[in-house]
Image (cartoon, coloured by chain):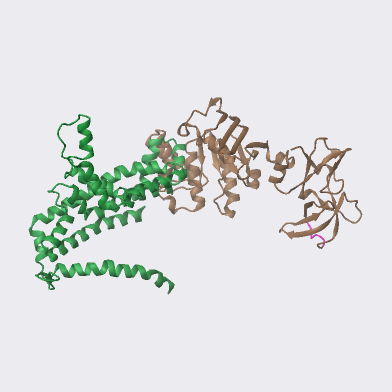
Chain colours: A green, B brown
Amino acid sequence: MSRAILLAPFWVWLLTLVAAPVLILVLMAFATPAEGVPPFTLGLRFAAFAMLVEDFYYAEALLAALRLAATTAGLCLLIAYPMALGMAGLRPGWRLPLLALLMLPFWTGFLLRIGAWIGLLRDEGLVNHLLRGFGITDAPLALLYTEGAMLAGMVHAYLPFAVLPIFTALIRLDPALLEAAADLGARPARVFFSITLPLTLPAAAAGFLLVFIPAAGEFVIPELLGPPEAQVIGRVLWQEFFQNRDWPLAAALALVLLALLILPIRWFQRLGASA
Amino acid sequence: MLSATALEKRFGAVRALAGLDLTINPGEFFALLGGSGSGKSTLLRVLAGFEAPDAGTLTLDGQDLLPVPPWARPINMMFQSYALFPHMSVGDNIAYGLKRAGVAAEERRNRIMAALDLVGLQGMEARRPQQLSGGQKQRVALARSLVMRPRVLLLDEPMAALDAGLRERTGLELRALQRKTGAAFIMVTHDQQEALALADRIAVLDAGRVAQIGPPQEVYARPATRFVARFLGAANVLEGRMQDGVFESAEVGGVIASGLPADTIAIALRAEQIRLTSADEAPRITGILEDAAFRGDDWLTIIRLPGGASLRVVHDTAPPAQGSLVGLLWEAGAVVPLFA
């Protein structure tokens, strides 16, 4: 009984915020676009899915999104692992302040942080100003609306999600294991690659996924910082919903993305079970 | 021969090692006995190379060990938690050190099999540590250290994580292994029974120093300080001083010893060396039987002395009723003078 009460919020959340929206998306995806509010009439029509298969535009956007998400998650991992290693190596008294610093950007609005990147990278921005000031360049470099700007914004936004699980795994690692390895003749680098890294790999995979999954649906950062040709799935979704007002197509697209993202989650569950 | 002199180690305000001197002979089973905070674990970590002492020297057969990092010391350690690598099989755990030492695959296999044989775990090399019982884990940890053929093996509370029933047998096996391999075993423990039962020599540590060192029988029978007498248990320690040839103690309220050295500041008297007088004997002192507890083989009683101190006394037969006036007697040689 008390178990049911404790689980009630979870079930309410699952039903109203996960199951119901997915159901609406499914209904919408099989509906017919129409003028009016809402802009569709219910039915059982496969045209939206057929369109996704026929027009490579959507497959390309999907691939672009997955590529962007994988690149972002990979970069985050490369930066996050050494960061977490450094933080975990500190005395406990220093860890919390650093953790707070890591989370500090979340205290400002997401859009403000994107705005800051625009301010830094635009033609008259700080970076170009400094480059010219030091005589490194004469004309402003095109920094904004590039792949690089988009990746910088993505990594900046998602990095903490990668650091946290790795940091947690590292501080939970029994120091006696590392000492035992050293005692048996392993030098520090060997200790890292034979003990620390394998034992924190599941956490690194968790960090990768925690970045990859939201990054795959990201549309604000590619829109505001990325090049015009960066037609990721999030942007396409937005356009179908709000510009073309083809809700069935947009819903079908969202469902495909959702289905694709379940794969890495399953893979992660297997990894977690084996560790 | 492993030799430490004047080792100092501070952690903030805590002096974990306070000028500790110690010599350990090749091939002996040595026990470091002490309570928490005595410095025994710090000493072990200094020997293994995980902590650098602030001052002092450490040599093994004349070679200075202090500049040698842990991975290059001919010393291995068995950790209290065993520290088995959870992502490796038993065989890979034991192979880890051999691989680092560059032992060829075939010899490695032979040595792993021999090590498993030594600790009685034949055929277990494919298991994961998670699939082993506590006793089996301990044996794998032992095999992983011994396969390196260390000159000195450090054992950090090797029996602490085992069930009480397993400890006695494991202890004897540990000593048999030590005899067989010929390595010097240095065991850290807080359990005096374990140390007395297994070691060739023991050192009782107190506040980062060696309070007493010697064969177990000697340290047990002749504790040098009040701390050692209390730590080894079962000894009554009575404070006082020598005056006119007799030991005077306010907490005793009578004369209980005489003819001790003039600088005696306390005496130790073992519980099992005191007995109750029969009707025709003159007691050395009388007291009130305050409490009695049956312990299986014998009874333990608490006797309140006139001066307020209480003595622990062991009886083979049922003691008189609580509140009885009893006379106590012991051999003159049972009294051990303490000077610190």
Q: Is residue B71 above or below residue A44?
A: above
Q: Is residue B86 above or below residue B322?
A: above
Residue extending farthest left = A54
Residue B6 inside the magenta-drawn segment: no
Residue toward you, B217 or B119: B217
Q: Report which quarter residue B232 is drawn in.
A: top right
Residue extending farthest top = B62
Q: Is residue B321 visible?
A: yes
Quarter of the image that includes the N terminus of chain B: top right
Residue toward you, A200 or A209: A209
Query: Residue A73: x and y, percent?
Result: 26, 48
Q: On the picture, is B173 further left or further right than A238? A: right
Q: Image point 83% across, 49% down: which residue? A: B252
Residue toward you, B231 or B265: B265
Q: Is residue B88 visible?
A: no
Query: Residue A163: x and y, percent?
Result: 34, 47
Residue toward you, B338 or B141: B338
Q: Main secondary structure of the magenta part?
A: loop
Q: Is residue B62 above or below residue B220?
A: above
Q: On the picture, is B173 further left or further right than A32? A: right
Quarter of the image that includes the C terminus of chain B: top right
Query: Residue A69: x and y, percent?
Result: 22, 50
Residue extending farthest bottom = A1
Residue B318 inside the magenta-drawn segment: yes
Q: On the picture, is A263 further left or further right than A104? A: left
Q: Image point 91% across, 51% down: which residue? A: B282
Query: Residue B323: x and y, percent?
Result: 82, 61
In the rendered structure, which segment of residues is drawn in magenta? B316-320
